[in-house]
Image (tube, helix red, strand yellow):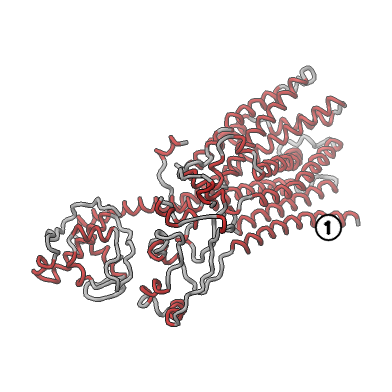
Amino acid sequence: MIRRILDMAVFGYFALIIVLILLLGFRWHTQRKAPTQPIAFSHEIHAGRLNLECVFCHDMADKSYFAGIPSVEKCMSCHTGVKTESPEIQKLTKYWNDKEPIPWERVHRIRIRNHVYFSHKRHIKAGAQCEHCHGDLRAMAQVRQVKSMKMGFCVSCHEVNKAPTDCLICHM
Amino acid sequence: MNFLSDYIIAPSGQHLKLLEFLAIVIYTVHLPYVALVIGSSGVAMWLTFSDHEIPSPRFARLAEDLLRTFLGNKLHMLVLGVLPLFALPFLYAQWFDAVPFAPIGYLVLPIPGILIGFALLWLYRSTFAGRKNEFHKHMGLGTLALLTLMGSYFVLLSAVVRLQDPEKWYRLTNLVILLLNWNVIYKFLFFVHAAFAFTGVGMLFFLFRWSDRPTTGDPEYAAFVRKFGAGLALAFSFALPVFNLLYVFTSPDVIFDSTVYGIAAATVFVCMLVAYMMLASLRSAAPRYTAAAFSMLIVVFVLSSTYDVRAMANANREHAVLLEQEAAKKRMEHEAEIDAKIAEQSGSSVGEETFNRVCTQCHRFDQKLVGPALATVLGKYNLESLKAFIANPTKVDPAYPPMPNPGLTAAQIAAVAAYELEHYQQAAGGAAGQTTAPGATPPDTTITQPEVKH
């Protein structure tokens, strides 16, 4: 009897730790899972296989604080002719005909953004690579955030590239 | 490690995968051996000390058996203990060649300490026979050896763990900062506990199942070794999952994918199997499942090193992409050179082949597609300006989407520009000379200046 209780206790102990590890995994999965987008746009096809440059679509990234999301017009400049038989492109065409913006889910976000000033333009002018913060989009069919976007992440890159690390550079 | 940079060419994706596999193999060969060495000398020292305080022949005999079995062979020390250490830095140097702040220098730092530790252990073992007369020298040597080895492995493991957190590399300016991190400390504690659990299991395996079985013919001693080994392994395999959990909990977010969590959970599961096997050994009259438990603990080492290598690769996947791109670029340039040579020899045209493969996705000569019909626009270019445009396209006509950079090499651009202009001139007959822009020289169809940027 005691032996059986002991066996159960051993099992319970190890099972508890396995469950805790899986819970950590579940938390990571829900927080970092790629959001479902209204159109199954694939960076893997556009940036990867077609080798389009990032600013080819995100044309505001090197001109503005915000990289922005490409306009529907930008999509339609190719997709009036290209691959119109695809149901995803037909969704796109519907937004275009209805003159509606596409309700994309935002993926990257600085958590305390009210206290941080970040300009895409400055960083691209200084030669920062998009993939350094956004990850390898050429391999992502569905975009997810891969970097922590916390202060340590910013500061490490500033240190490496001899960019200023004064507090007021970002916090103002 | 910068002196190595001259000898390293950018590794391809498959090469990086191979390096990861080799890293796992090296850890799997090296860490279990070191675990046995550290664990067995620690246990032997405790036994010797107890025997010294309250003389007990069983303790002395087990201490001697442990030292003979686990520290007895210089060849093992060299092949399993020392050589893998020298392979490791070379392996990571290929991964992190010319990466600023990558802490791979710290992988080399502990090597002298580890060598000294092994030498001291050898001295410790050789003074075992005379320990009655020189007890303090014997124990002092052992303590010094253990502390040197543990300290060195703390540094080595912290360097391995810190490779998984590239966001913090810039802070690793000295050894203290490298070591003072909860993630590193939990990893080290996991390793030490695994070492003692492995020693307990190794005791049962080598003293009962291996070729010379010192426990046969002495049931009292056999029972003592069985209880001691199984108890040791059981206690430490209970502690392992806690440190594993804390290690996962303190790991940075960037290392994770579902496989990494799976590996961590599998490690705990294997520890559970070991615990049940040791319980069975304690309860029955003879050790049971010794070979299985021994293999299972090796699996724990394999899993934990797979976790670390996978974590390192996940955390640095962008760097891997850049390496792959560089390798792909080199390969492409090389292939383009070969193509050009073949075309030169056979008389066919690189330009035509490139045009059909790349440009025709959007352009035809006589027909509007995604881009304009080439017959309507080529008149505006001569060879130089066309090459410059293909190398770095800009938006010209607002009626069309901007042209993406086709990603061609300088030689391919020159060839395709020449081909397009030649084709255009043939189509336009003798009138081509008049259609070029005023002041521009007539198109020169020879490949003269392949140094255009792209």
Residue appearing at x 83%, y 46% in the figure: B282
Identity of the amino acid at label 1?
A: Met
What residue occupies the far right of the structure in this picture?
A: A1
Of residues B30 and B75, the one nearer the viewer is B30
Q: Residues within 10 Å of mark 1 (few under 14, many from 20)?
A: few
Q: Which residue is mark 1?
A: A8
Residue B21 position within the rendered picture, expressed as x and y whole percent measured from the top left: 54, 49
- Chain letter for mark 1, please: A
Residue appearing at x 31%, y 73% in the figure: B370
Of residues B324 and A144, the one nearer the viewer is A144
Residue B94, can we see it? no
Residue B438 position within the rendered picture, expressed as x and y whole percent measured from the top left: 12, 63
Q: Secondary structure at mark 1?
A: helix
Residue appearing at x 49%, y 46% in the figure: A158
What residue occupies the far front of the structure in this picture?
A: A172
Relative to B50, does residue B365 appear above or below in the rendering? below
Quadrant of the frame with the C terminus of chain B: bottom left
Residue appearing at x 39%, y 64% in the figure: A59
Residue B205 position within the rendered picture, expressed as x and y whole percent measured from the top left: 73, 42
Residue A42, can we see it? yes
Relative to B263, does residue B226 appear above or below in the rendering? above
Residue B49 occupies quadrant: top right
Relative to B428, does residue A24 appear above or below in the rendering? above
Residue B92 position within the rendered picture, expressed as x and y whole percent measured from the top left: 51, 42
